[in-house]
Structure formats: C-alpha cells, structure tokens
Image: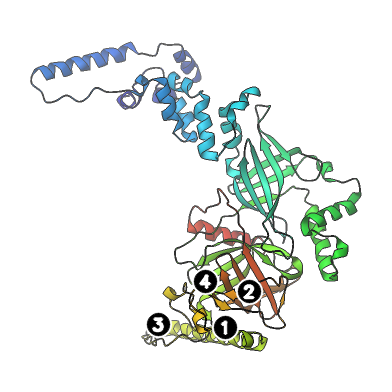
Amino acid sequence: MAVCARLCGVGPSRGCRRRQQRRGPAETAAADSEPDTDPEEERIEAGAAAVAGAQGGRGAGPQPPPRCSLLELPPELLVEIFASLPGTDLPSLAQVCTKFRRILHTDTIWRRRCREEYGVCENLRKLDITGVSCRDVYAKLLHRYRHILGLWQPDIGPYGGLLNVVVDGLFIIGWMYLPPHDPHVDDPMRFKPLFRVHLMERKSATVECMYGHRGPHNGHIQIVKKDEFSTKCNQTDHHRMSGGRQEEFRTWLREEWGRTLEDIFHEHMQELILMKFIYTSQYDNCLTYRRIYLPPSHPDDLIRPGLFKGTYGSHGLEIVMLSFHGKRARGTKITGDPNIPAGQQTVEIDLRHRIQLPDVESLRNFSELSRLVLDVREQLRQEQQQESGLEDGEAGGRQSPREPQRGPAQPGAELPAEKVGEAGGAEAAGAQPGQGQPFVLPVGVSSRNEDYPRTCRMCFYGTGLIAGHGFTSPERTPGVFILFDEDRFGFIWLELKSFSLYSRVQATFRNAEAPSPQAFEEMLKNIQSLTS
C-alpha cells in the first residue's frame, strides 16, 4: 500500500487502484460516497512527520524534499498531462481515483488524442450540436475500428485489389485504389469508396456500404482475426441498375477501362474483360480482406521500393509491389489476372548479374539482345553447378578451392555488391556518367505503351513468370530488367517478345509499415499461398 501512496498520493483511500481490484462492485460503490481522505492514513503520515522532525532535531543529515502528489496539481495542469498520454492508457488512469475520472471527461484531452493518434484535423467542436463528444469519437469509432486502418488485399479470386482504409474527417473510409486506364501508366491512380464508418447522430458507429450508384446503405464489418476482416452489404438491391445487367456492364466498363466494348477490337481482350466483370460483380461487396505491408527500404537498395503500375498486355494495367531481398529484387502482384493471379511473384531480378546493352543500332536486333540474355542464363547455370559441387565437396571433407580473381566486368558478369548502385552501364555505351544509356526496344517486341523512356540507367538479368489460363503450367522465363529512373522501370519478356513498363504509385499510405522485416516476408508468403 505504501507503493500506492508514493505513486498517487492516495494510498489506502477509496480511490486506490490496488484496493479497488480487491473490492467487489458493492464495496466500490460504497467507497465512492466516502470522503477523499483517510483519517488512518493522516495519522500515519503525521506520526512519520513527527519522527522525522525529532531525528532532524538530533542533528541528522539533510532532509529529503517534501513529497508532491499528482492530486495536489491544479486540474488544468492535469488536463495537459493526461492529454499527452496514449489514449489506450487513459481508462486505467480513470480507475485511480474519482478526481482523475472526473478530469478525464474533459473533451480537450480526447480531442488531442484524436488529432495526434489518428490525424483527425476536423473541427471536433461542432460535435456539440449532435451531442457526440470527442471521447465518443475516440472510443466508439477510432479506437474500436483501429485494426482495419492501413492497406489490404481483397480476396477476389485471381484479380485481387488494393484497399486503403483511412480516417477521413469524422469518417473511416475504405478506398479501393484502381490503376489508370490502359495504357496510360504514368497517370495517377483512381479510387472509389467501398464502405464507410461514422459516428454522427447516434451513440454507436454506423457502417455503410458505398458500392453501386444509389448512395450509402446499410452494411456490416466483422474483424475475423488479426490482420483480416470482412465486409457485408445488407441491401444488395442498391447495387442493381434499372437497365439490368447490360447497363451495369456498360457502366462498369466505362469506369474500369474508360471505353465502350465497341472501342475494343481485340476479341481475346473482350473475352477477358467480360470474364472479369462476371467474376467480380458476383461478390456484391461482400469481401474478405487480408493486410499487406509496404516493403521496408534499405540504404543500398537500387531504388526506393514500393507500389508500381505495370502494363500486362490484354489484361490492362496491374499493381505490382517491388521489394529488395539482398542481391535479388522481386515484383509481387497486388492485382492479377487469370494467367498470373494476385499474390504471385511476377518478376525476379538478379542484382549480381548486370547486362551491358549494345549500342542502339545493335539493340534493335532482337537476336542480339536474346544472345546476351541467354549467355547470362548459361553462366548462372554453370555457377549453380559449381556451387552445388563445392557443397558436395565440403560435405565430403574436401577443402573448397580458392575463388578465382575477378577480371574486368563483361556483359552478364557478376558485379561486386558495392558497384550495383552505380550507373556504370552508361560508360560502356559511350554515355557520360549520370546521363544514362540510350535505349530502344528491339524490333518485334510489342509494347502497350510506346511512350517509354529512351534512356536507361542500367540493366540486370531477370526472370518473369508466365502461365496458361487458370495459372496452368507456370514457369519462369529469362528476361531483362531495365531501370529508367527512380520512378520507372521496365521488363522485356524474351519468350513472349513483350515489354512491360512500370511507373511508381505516387501516393502516401499511413499505417502500412511492416512491424519487422520478418513480418513483411511472412506477408509475402501468405498472399502467394492463397493463389498457388
């Protein structure tokens, strides 16, 4: 009990938290009607003071400064102190004593917690009109639904998606992020609301479905487990249009592709579009979402990792997450298609094996580029065989041979790690450092976007994942990763004779950082396993 006395200056009085934990509800209620001071405690403190005074009169050493209790501080100072504490700690603080509990009803404290913890910049004073307090907003809206804030991937079969749940004023809104219309990869992302949660006129938060074109309607959110939640629409009739499925399809096509079906002359592309509409519309916004994290960055990364928009032929634009893993980089699909679904690793870049492109005229020859790439693939195969032989030799007790000394870098040769970030490929092509190397697509390589950069910083050997419809017979095939600048890169799929251009998603996401590198790696495995 002495510990309590030193902490809060209350000791064994009615407000002592330790004593309250041992009381039943009836005892606690009775204690609330008692005075704030305990006569027994006063007698003990008076006796202790008399003893201390007597010791001081006998020439004892310097006395400690008088004890100061939080209870002795003025209320306005306590408000400032409590407002600086995390909101999750305040309910425990309210159990200390009646004075603390009374002060914690001050709206100024909760207004500051809403602003600092959740970024609510709205003028919360206007809540007085509706009878909703800042404490209600914090406890019944922000804190209750805090676990759904951040980035999520919906489970929509092979198509996936990117959902960003944010605090927007006095609402929590789930925004679905969509790539720009094909093939304008450099255009900004589009987004539309799928649901919202708000606390305006009632004492409990209201969930509304925003899907369709008939305004907000009744919805439901269920937090299934850690890093997973689901949404359900309770009025799916609001998703229907008076013109039936044909009108719904035409509206969806204008929003998704920015065109009509008559504008799309490629028959295979028409089939893919119709298939996506039929598949995705059946969910009626009743979806399960799994949390995703943005990739962590490191000082030696080739470029800043993050989300990119990429061209994927007849499938249109898709969202890819670029991440770095030591001497390799990976592109993981956040949105996908029936061939390579969301969650799969679409490209992998070997940062140890740089490809020095030939001059522009030679680069126009696809056979020349193909020869360079296949030479690197053969070199990789031999290195893997050597490594396998060395491991077998070490397992048998033989000493591994000394690593041969490196010579000058050749096309496809492995570069030391400290050289990966340099723009060395430009010098080999005659360009000055920092200016980049001239780049042009070889004749015969198709591209959805002809407006690609005409200079690049460097190129690396990589592999791309291809498969048949339904993710049948997947295989990794050789290709070239081309780094254009900090925000754009490309990939040439050798076997498909196709080029994909990727442009960075220029958006800021809150609550999207992985708690640890291990958590990010685990997240990648989880989203990949769902579609394997």
Q: Which of marks 3 and 1 is in front?
A: 1
Residue at 45% of width from left, 67% of height from top? 300
In the displayed orientation, state which residue is furthest to the right: 243
Q: Which of marks 4 and 2 is in front?
A: 2
The residue under label 4 is 328
Q: Nearer the viewer, mark 1 or mark 4?
A: 1
The residue under label 2 is 491
Q: Position of residue 414 (x, y in %)?
A: 48, 81
Amino acid on which disc 4 is placed: Arg
C-beta proximity under 8 Å, tags 4 and 2? no
Whole-number angstrom distance, CA of label 2 to CA of label 3: 38 Å
Number of callouts:
4
Disc 4, SS: strand
Q: In which quarter of the image is residue 483?
A: bottom right
Q: Position of residue 189 (x, y in %)?
A: 67, 56
Viewer can see residue 184 = yes
Q: Earlier in the sequence, mark 1 or mark 4?
A: 4
Q: Earlier in the sequence, mark 2 or mark 3?
A: 3
C-beta proximity under 8 Å, tags 2 and 1? no
